[in-house]
Image (cartoon, coloured by chain):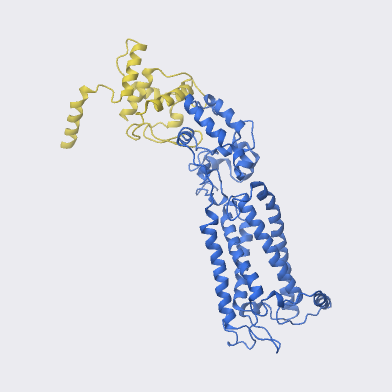
Chain colours: A blue, B yellow
């Protein structure tokens, strides 16, 4: 990509400035990463998915700004979006004709508006899910679990819509290239296209300032995400007695993982605790029972508290909840017998933040050899 | 060779002052064992070893013997049924194993019940610890 607007071997002048082209291809890469991690990879890739979201937020922010102050063909104001012109262009297309526009043609311009709009919706809903379900990111303290869960459906809808729009966009590019022989793809690489005589090509100034603006928005957003947004982990430290007494036999489960009723039953029957005598002296029993009472599933707004903690099972086991089983159904029974795991209730074998009760997807680290 | 001999001499020199027990806990168990049965003389590591290794089959079906969770070797780490590592029982492998009376009593209370289906006698506890102190 050349940064200079008027020199170079190509005879055509530059109409797509460097930052807009950089924006386009960075977005292609980030959307690719976000779709692969979102559609195909296991839950523990969610932090990569979210990082792609942060990068896209920076890119989008730049693009909206550049759509106002950028070079001639990058500005939304210059897009041929008028109804009459769009209709005329559509009619032309249906008759197998497409006149060569210097910038975007009307259908292409509308496509960009739709793509940017659905990407905006996708990012906003994504961060609501990230905040509500995973207690991470800019909305972690404002969005509750239920809103996060509900928004996941909307996020998925917009993801589907974006995929469909990308499909139409690619089809359009293919038709323009193969059928009408317009220089569409190379122009998005070197920025050069034919120019009508009364227009001025991109200046070096646009290329420099824009590229600087693009880089600083993306880096700024990612930096903010790393330093502020992702450090809002809310945790309740487990008291030493709780950790000691419960942790003697199993990892000390976070109190948010069971309901008050379940905890009460468990604490009243410590003498026969899953076929073990786990009885404690009255002082310790009392202390642990009151800690559990103050911190049961109803007191926490995490995904684990909602989907496991608040769901009572006859055995009082977390592993009997549907959510637990659904989330672990691709592990064979032997996986839990692996020496790095030991048993189904050894949560922290894979969930590195189990003791905090957060169970972030991004903190899952399945030991080598367990999943085979 | 010489340092070994010296160490042995030091042990011998102190031995008469500390018969059998090296911990106040063992003295307590010895007192109680005596009052339980007048013909009790002293704890033996052999009886402790038998208690540890025998398949009792008297308590919970999941835990027929101590070794169900603690493995056959007191020097090795065990594993709880929930998958948590248990520090070795041998005093040489886990220091402080037998220094907190409340903790020792808690585990005898629970585990004797699980393995033997009853509480352990003071003699059994003393034998067990005596065996573990030699390991």
Residue A39 higher or lower than A68, as above or below: above
Name the spot of residue A242 as percent of width and height, x first: 48, 34
> Dividing the image into 4 quarters, which one contains the N terminus of chain A?
bottom right
Name the spot of residue A285 as percent of width and height, x first: 50, 27
Please identify the quarter of the rendering in which residue B26 is found: top left
Residue A134 higher or lower than A312, as above or below: below
Please identify the quarter of the rendering in which residue B130 is found: top left
Q: Residue at x 55, y 56 (%)?
A: A229
Q: Quick check: can you spot residue B48?
A: yes
Q: Residue furthest left?
A: B2
Residue B124 higher or lower than A201, as above or below: above
Name the spot of residue B15 as percent of width and height, x first: 21, 24
Q: Residue at x 45, y 31 (%)?
A: B69
Q: Residue at x 56, y 75 (%)?
A: A211
Residue B125 higher or lower than A108, as above or below: above
**Is A180 or A3 nearer to us in this picture?**
A3
Name the spot of residue A70 as percent of width and height, x first: 63, 77
**Is A321 or A305 nearer to us in this picture?**
A305
| For residue A340, side relative to residue A53 (left or right) | left
| For residue A14, side relative to residue B54 (left or right) | right
Q: Quick check: can you spot residue B1?
A: no
| For residue B86, side relative to residue A6 (left or right) | left
| For residue B103, side relative to residue A185 (left or right) | left
Question: Total number of numbered labels?
Answer: 0
Q: Residue furthest top?
A: B38
**Is B88 or A201 nearer to us in this picture?**
A201
**Is A336 or B95 nearer to us in this picture?**
B95
């Amino acid at each position: 990509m050349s940064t200079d607007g008027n020199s170079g071997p190509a005879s055509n002048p530059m109409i797509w400035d460097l930052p807009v082209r950089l924006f386009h291809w960075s977005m292609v890469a980030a959307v690719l990463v976000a779709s692969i991690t979102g559609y195909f990879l296991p839950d523990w890739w969610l932090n990569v998915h979210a990082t792609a979201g942060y990068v896209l937020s920076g890119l989008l922010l730049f693009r909206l700004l550049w759509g106002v102050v950028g070079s001639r063909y990058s500005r939304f104001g210059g897009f041929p979006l008028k109804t009459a012109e769009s209709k005329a262009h559509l009619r032309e297309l249906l008759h197998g004709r497409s006149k060569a526009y210097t910038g975007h043609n009307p259908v292409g311009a509308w496509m960009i508006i739709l793509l940017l709009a659905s990407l905006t919706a996708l990012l906003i809903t994504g961060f609501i899910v990230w905040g509500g379900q995973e207690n991470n990111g800019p909305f972690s303290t404002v969005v509750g679990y239920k809103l996060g869960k509900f928004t996941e459906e909307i996020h998925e809808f917009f993801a589907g819509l974006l995929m469909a729009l990308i499909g139409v966009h690619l089809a359009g590019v293919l038709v323009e290239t193969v059928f009408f022989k317009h220089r569409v793809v190379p122009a998005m690489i070197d920025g050069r296209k034919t120019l009508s005589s009364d227009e001025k090509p991109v200046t070096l100034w646009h290329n420099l300032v824009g590229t600087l603006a693009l880089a600083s928005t993306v880096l700024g957003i990612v930096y903010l995400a790393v330093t502020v947004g992702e450090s809002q982990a809310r945790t309740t430290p487990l008291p030493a007695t709780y950790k000691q007494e419960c942790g003697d036999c199993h990892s000390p489960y976070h109190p948010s993982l069971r309901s008050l009723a379940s905890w009460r039953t468990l604490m009243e029957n410590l003498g026969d605790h899953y076929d073990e005598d786990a009885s404690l002296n009255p002082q310790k029993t009392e202390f642990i029972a009151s800690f559990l009472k103050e911190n049961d599933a109803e007191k926490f707004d995490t995904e684990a508290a909602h989907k496991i903690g608040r769901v009572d099972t006859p055995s009082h086991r977390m592993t009997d909840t549907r959510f637990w089983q659904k989330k672990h159904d691709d592990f064979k029974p032997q996986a839990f017998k692996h020496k790095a795991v030991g048993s189904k209730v050894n949560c922290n074998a894979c969930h590195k933040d189990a003791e905090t009760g957060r169970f972030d997807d991004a903190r899952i680290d399945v030991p080598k050899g367990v999943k085979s | 060779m010489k340092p070994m001999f010296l160490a042995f001499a030091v042990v011998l020199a102190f031995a008469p002052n500390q018969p059998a027990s090296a911990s106040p806990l063992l003295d307590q168990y010895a007192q109680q064992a005596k009052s339980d049965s007048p013909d009790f003389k002293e704890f033996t590591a052999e009886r402790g070893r038998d208690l540890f290794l025998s398949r009792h089959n008297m308590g919970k079906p999941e835990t027929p013997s101590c070794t169900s969770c603690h493995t056959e070797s007191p020097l090795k780490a065990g594993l709880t049924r929930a998958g948590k590592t248990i520090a070795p029982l041998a005093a040489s492998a886990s220091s402080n194993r037998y220094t907190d009376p409340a903790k020792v009593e808690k585990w005898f209370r629970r585990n004797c019940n699980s393995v033997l289906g009853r509480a352990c006698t003071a003699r059994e506890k003393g034998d067990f610890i005596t065996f573990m102190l030699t390991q």
